[in-house]
Each structure stands twice: as C-alpha cells, then as structure tokens.
Image (tube, rainbow, N blue to C red):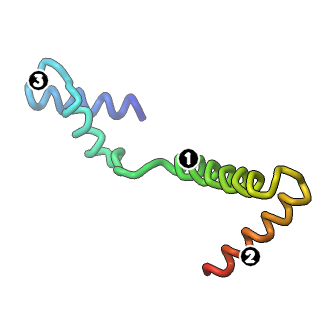
Amino acid sequence: MINILCDNALLSGYAQDQKVVDKKIIREAARDLHLETGRFPQSYWFSLAGIVVIMILLYVAYRTGWTYKSFETGLMNLIEMVRGWI
C-alpha cells in the first residue's frame, strides 16, 4: 500500500511539475486512493472500551473495600443500577 501511495504521489508531483513531493501532494494522493477516512481506527475504539471497563472495575473495587466478596456485591449493584438506566 505504501508503494502505491508513493507512486501516486510521485505521479501527481510530476504532473504538477513539482521538484519536491510535499505533504499536500501526499495527502492528495491518499484522498485519491480513499485512504483518509477521518475516523479513528477500530483498534482505538477497542482500546478505549477496554480502558473504560478497567476503570469501572477499579471504581467498584475501590468503593467496595477491595475484597473479593465485596467486589462481587458491588459489581452486582452496579449492574442493577445500569439496568435501571436502560
């Protein structure tokens, strides 16, 4: 994919009679190849979801005193609270 992008950028630069292929030409070539979507990659959202889950679990653990039994009870209370929102 990098070779295709570079080839298109070089061709665009040549067509525009540019001696240097700059960012503008690279971005134009990427747009032409539909490589710029303006969205975050899927891995970003999975990472963010994982961080949120860990933060929620740490919050429940903190609020319940950090023991397994109280953590389980706190987690069940949190699930019930979320169900009440839906």
Residue 61 falls left or right of residue 13: right
| Label of residue 22 in the image | none
Count residues near mark 1 (Cα–Cα under 10 Å), then give few for <14, some for 14-19, many for 20+. few
Residue at image x 73%, y 68%? 78
Query: How far is mark 3 from mark 2, CA to CA?
Result: 64 Å
Query: How far is mark 2 from mark 1, CA to CA?
Result: 30 Å
From the viewer's perspective, is the residue at label 2 or at label 1 nearer? 2
Name the quadrant containing residue 33.
Answer: top left
Secondary element type, mark 2: helix
Q: Is residue 83 above or below residue 47?
A: below
Name the quadrant containing residue 64.
Answer: bottom right
Quarter of the image with the N terminus is top left
| Foreground residue among 40 and 13 | 40
Query: How far is mark 1 from mark 3, CA to CA?
Result: 37 Å
Question: Which tag, 2 or 1, sits closer to the chain's start?
Answer: 1
Count residues near mark 3 (Cα–Cα under 10 Å), then give few for <14, some for 14-19, many for 20+. few
The kind of residue tagged 3 is: Gln
Q: Is residue 48 above or below residue 71?
A: above
| Label of residue 18 in the image | 3
| Foreground residue among 14 and 49 | 49
Residue matched to label 1: 43
Tally the numbered discs.
3
Question: Which tag, 1 or 3, sits closer to the chain's start?
Answer: 3
| Label of residue 80 in the image | 2
Residue at image x 89%, y 54%? 68
The kind of residue tagged 1 is: Ser
